[in-house]
Image (spheres, helix red, strand yellow):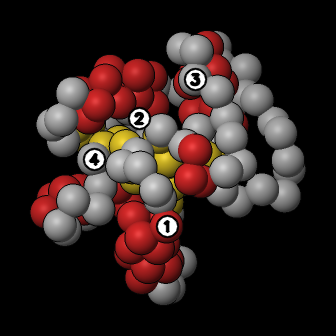
Amino acid sequence: MEVVRSLLTYNDYLETDDISSANVILLNTCSIREGAEEKVWRELKRIRSVARKMPVIGVLGCMAERVRHNLLSKNGLVDVVAGPDAYRDLPRLLAVARAGSNAINVQLSVEETYADVKPVRVDKNAKTAFV
């Protein structure tokens, strides 16, 4: 999430801990752990139920890549789907979603390493960030 935070900060996004004021909410996922996908589905439903306005909600990471079509077909829970090699594309994907369309990029890359991106570490124990 530190790479995503760095890329979005560079593109003038501000971070907040207040879910009700967030314009964009991103969940970084992994579907290797048992039960991880179920937790993500529960969290997506919770976010949609507590968010006062309609923020753009994105799912990032390997789960996003693996179940991309299911994420976009579940009753408007998710607006943006980005695989681990598509984080540089997030500003464009978020703009597409803000304009009212679903946005997806799960293209794999053998070249993307994010080596030039300096990760922004806020809390080494944090598991979630709202941007």
For marks 4 and 3 on the same chain, the one whose residue lies earlier in the sequence:
3
The residue that label 2 is drawn on is 85
Residue 62 is situated, as x and y percent measured from the top left of the image, at 41, 56
The secondary structure type at the circle numbered 3 is loop
* Above or below for 2 versus 65: above
The secondary structure type at the circle numbered 2 is loop
Task: Tell us which disc is closer to us: 2 or 1.
Answer: 1
The residue that label 4 is drawn on is 79
Q: Nearer the viewer, residue 92 or 55?
A: 55
* Above or below for 86 versus 84: above
The residue that label 3 is drawn on is 13
Mark seen at residue 50: 1
Q: Are marks 4 and 3 in contact (CB under 8 Å)?
A: no
Occupied quadrant, residue 48: bottom left
In three-dimensional space, the C-alpha distance between marks 1 and 3, rounded to whole angstroms, equals 22 Å
For marks 2 and 4 on the same chain, the one whose residue lies earlier in the sequence:
4
Can residue 107 be seen at all in this image of the molecule? Answer: no
Q: Residue at coordinates 29% horizontally, 62% vertically from top-left?
A: 77
Please name the amino acid that badge 4 sits on: Asp
